[in-house]
């Protein structure tokens, strides 16, 4: 025990100071493309596999909620400027208000893997690891929906996960909020809508907060949870140059 305490004192605090201070550690985010003036905007926009890039009179606009981070617009002659932020979460058009103030320091979150590839859940598993330490905000992961205030969904909602999603949502007490994590949960992502995929969580339950990315990095997920309790400002996801 004494050794453990001494080692901790020697190593110092390893948890990010964000959001009190900016987090600029290399690799903490893959970044995101920025809108830019381009004469060949049509050509640049055409390389995006999900139509997240749009050509208009002002150049190339970015609808980040559709970006699957394929990196095609990061290099080569189509390269757009990228910025290294991660505060990507935003409210939806049908979002309810943030949870009441009593949830600000005591929030319970239930994960739901609704057919995700593993990427989003892999990042989500890191949010309570020492570098990010979700617990410092009073946010905890719970195994039962009956204790959950927020449902954090990944994946496009496969046919097999329709009923589990609905039952999980119904089992949660009011007030509750739903956060869609990753492009698949927002709009189906590369899976889209089909006989096997609902094309995103909003097809079945009301989604309050979306966290773009494929997958979103851990701090983007934390930002989305803070937004659900009114402790963070939303990002603007659709931008024009
Ligand atoms: S990184 Fe995103 S915006 Fe750029 S081409 Fe890929 S999906 Fe489209
Ligand atoms: S958004 Fe990307 S990482 Fe997340 S489940 Fe979909 S494909 Fe996987």
Image: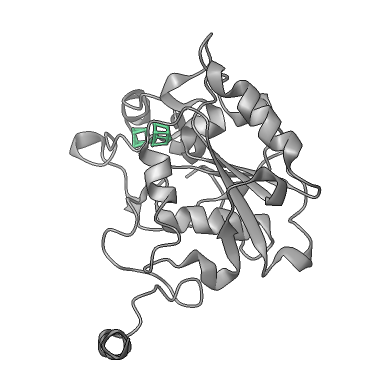
In front of the other: 82 or 110: 110
Residue 3 in view, yes or no: yes
Residue 36 in view, yes or no: no
The image shows residue 117 at horizontal and vertical percentages of 38, 31
The reply, left or right, for residue 89 in relation to residue 190 is right
Ligand 2 resides in the quarter of the picture at top left
Q: Say which quadrant the N terminus sits in.
A: bottom left
Relative to 233, residue 51 above or below: above
**Residue positioned 39% across, 56% down in the render:** 126
The image shows residue 139 at horizontal and vertical percentages of 59, 63
The image shows residue 210 at horizontal and vertical percentages of 58, 43
User: How was the colour assigned to the protein in this rendering?
Assistant: one colour
**Residue positioned 75% across, 35% down in the render:** 170
Q: Quadrant of residue 191?
A: top left
Q: Quadrant of residue 44?
A: top left
In front of the other: 122 or 188: 122
Relative to 178, residue 26 above or below: below
**Residue positioned 26% across, 42% down in the render:** 74
Q: Farthest residue toward the top?
A: 195
The reply, left or right, for residue 32 in relation to residue 182 is left
**Residue positioned 53% across, 58% down in the render:** 223
């Amino acid at each position: 025990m004494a050794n453990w305490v001494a080692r901790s004192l020697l190593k110092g605090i390893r948890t990010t100071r964000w959001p009190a201070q900016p987090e600029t550690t290399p690799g903490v985010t893959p970044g995101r493309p920025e809108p830019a003036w381009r004469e060949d905007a049509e050509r640049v926009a055409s390389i995006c596999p999900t139509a997240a890039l749009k050509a208009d009179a002002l150049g190339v606009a970015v609808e980040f909620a559709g970006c699957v981070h394929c990196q095609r617009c990061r290099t080569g002659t189509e390269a757009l400027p990228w910025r290294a932020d991660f505060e990507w979460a935003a409210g939806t058009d049908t979002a309810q208000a943030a949870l009441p103030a009593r949830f600000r320091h005591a929030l319970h979150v239930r994960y739901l893997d609704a057919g995700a590839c593993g990427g989003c859940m892999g990042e989500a598993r890191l949010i309570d690891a020492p570098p990010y330490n979700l617990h410092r905000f009073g946010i905890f992961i719970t195994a039962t929906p009956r204790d959950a205030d927020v449902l954090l969904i990944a994946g496009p909602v496969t046919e097999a996960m329709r009923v589990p999603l609905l039952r999980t949502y119904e089992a949660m007490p009011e007030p509750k909020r739903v956060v869609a994590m990753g492009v698949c949960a927002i709009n189906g992502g590369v899976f889209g809508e089909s006989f096997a995929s609902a094309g995103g969580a909003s097809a079945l339950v009301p989604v309050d907060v979306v966290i773009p990315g494929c997958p979103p990095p851990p701090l983007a997920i934390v930002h989305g949870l803070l937004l659900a309790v009114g402790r963070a400002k939303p990002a603007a996801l659709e931008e024009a140059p």
